[in-house]
Structures are given as structure tokens and as C-alpha cells.
Amino acid sequence: MRTLVAIPVYNEATHVRGVMDRVLHYHGDVLTIDDGSTDQTPHILADYPVELLRHPENRGYGAAMRDAFNFARVEKYDWLITMDCDDQHEPAAIPAFIEAAQAGGEDVISGSRYLCDKSGDRPPPERREINRVLTAEINARLSRRLGSILTDAFCGFKAYRVQSLRDLRPTERGYAFPMQFWVQAAAAGLKVRELPVRLIYNDPNRSFGAHLDDPAVRLAHYRSVLHRELRRHAEHLPVRSLAGLGEQGCCCP
């Protein structure tokens, strides 16, 4: 089973060396997507035996994820594991994702920071609330189709069966990428299960960019992307998934 670990990176000079050292300890086949870093990140990555894609300017988390999906398909990997480079995902969990993938039966193994949280860390309340609200809505609309109840819709630590990604056409460039992904995964009939991962928050003041730092605006934006995608894939989803969307969805910023 050929497995690729892909890591989007943007201005992570503080963390990238430690993360890369630990990732390569657990898995040697690694792709990094440098999303237009302006600090020392590109120079540090040059020290490591990894594949490197570089955006000339910052394009967003979703754009980096699209590159990871495309690279894994073109290079004929069987599974793709994605993780962050901000020291909030533990590379020591990589073998657990590989073991879960080898067990078969699912198309997506999705990390959950809340499935079995025994850590002392706590996310900023507004982040946890946005995750809770949108995870609940995704479950209400899509859980039967996904074959699983989610507890964490936003965790970027995941393993994907690469063949299952062939029918997905993600276009979302920013942090709303998971909202589009879950709808497209459900429409394509992908099966999901969660894997507990450690809850780690090193930077409670991280910016989401401009107006999205306002929690109300961020929630409205994420929900608008979710509802737009539900309408777009209505023909492939059960009627109950679309209940209450109306013509315009709701809460568009």
C-alpha cells in the first residue's frame, strides 16, 4: 500500500523543522505544499528529502489541499494522509492512520480531537462552538450518506483512499474547504470513520484572515459554503439533506 503524507505549509519557520524531523521518523514519503511563505520556511524545507510544491503567493488552505489530492492521484498513491505543520498534529499518530487504512472498509479516516479527548488543552470557545454547530448540521444532513456520525468536522488530520477522490471537484480555496469536502464526499458515496487524535492548541490567536477573524462572520461564511454545496449536489443527496435550505441558503455574510 503506497501512502503519501502531505503537509500544507505557510510561514511555519517556528515549527517546520521539528515537524519534518518527526514526520520523517514515522514515514519517508512526504509532500509539502508551501503556500507562498514569506519567512524562512522554504529554505528550511530545502534541507529535507521531500517532494515540494510551491505557490508563488498565498492561495489558501483549500488550494493546498487540492494540490495534495491531485499529486496523490497523478503519482498513483493508494492512500493520502494530510496533516498540519503548526505542531498541533502529532506525527506519532501516522502509523495509526495507516493501520486504519489497511483494515479496509472506509474511504476516509478522519481525525477527531473530540472523540476521546483526555488532554488538558482546550480550544478557544468560539472555535469549539463553530465546530460544534457545523458538525451537528453536517450530521443532520449527511451522516446516513457518510455512514458515520462526526464529532469533529474541521480536523485536517485525515487519511483518504486516493481512488475515492477521483469524483471530487473541490474549488474552495480557503478554510471553508471542509464544508465543501463533506458534501462532495457524501454525494460520491464515500464512507467515513473517525480516529481519535490528541487535542493540541498552540496558537489560540491564529488569524483566519481579514473579516473571518470575526466568529459570527466566519460561521456565516462556512455555513454559506455548506449550503451552496448542498444545493449544487442536490440530485445526488437524499431530500432530507436539503430540508430548510430555501432558495438562497441562510446566513450568507
Image: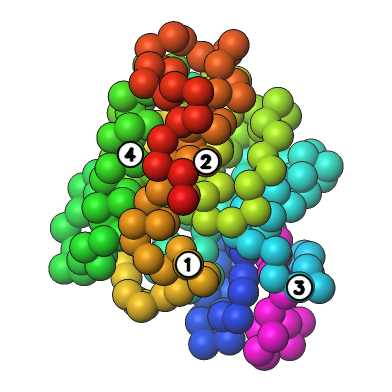
Classify residue 215 as left or right of residue 9: left
Residue sitting at 59 percent across and 11 percent down? 235
| Residue matched to label 3 | 57
Residue 172 higher or lower than 247, as above or below: below
Residue sitting at 50 percent across and 30 percent down? 248
Classify residue 135 as left or right of residue 237: left
Residue 61, percent from left and from top: 60, 59
Give neighbour class at mark 2: few <14, some 14-19, many 20+ (Cα, 10 Å). some
| Residue matched to label 2 | 225
N-terminal label among 3 and 4: 3
N-terminal label among 2 and 4: 4
Residue interval drawn in magenta: 30-46
The kind of residue tagged 3 is Glu
| Residue matched to label 1 | 211
Numbered disc 4: secondary structure: helix
Residue 140, percent from left and from top: 31, 24
| Residue matched to label 4 | 135
N-terminal label among 3 and 1: 3
Q: CA distance from mark 3 to mark 4?
A: 31 Å
N-terminal label among 2 and 3: 3
Q: CA distance from mark 3 to mark 1?
A: 20 Å
- Looking at the image, do the residues carrying marks 2 and 3 touch, with CB atoms under 8 Å apart? no
Residue 58, magenta (yes or no) = no
Number of the front mark, 1 or 2 = 1
Question: Which is more toward the observer, 30 or 206?
Answer: 206
Residue sitting at 37 percent across and 66 percent down? 214
Number of the front mark, 4 or 1 = 1
Residue 87, percent from left and from top: 44, 73
Q: CA distance from mark 1 to mark 2?
A: 16 Å
Numbered disc 3: secondary structure: loop
Residue sitting at 26 percent across and 45 percent down? 132
Q: CA distance from mark 2 to mark 4?
A: 14 Å
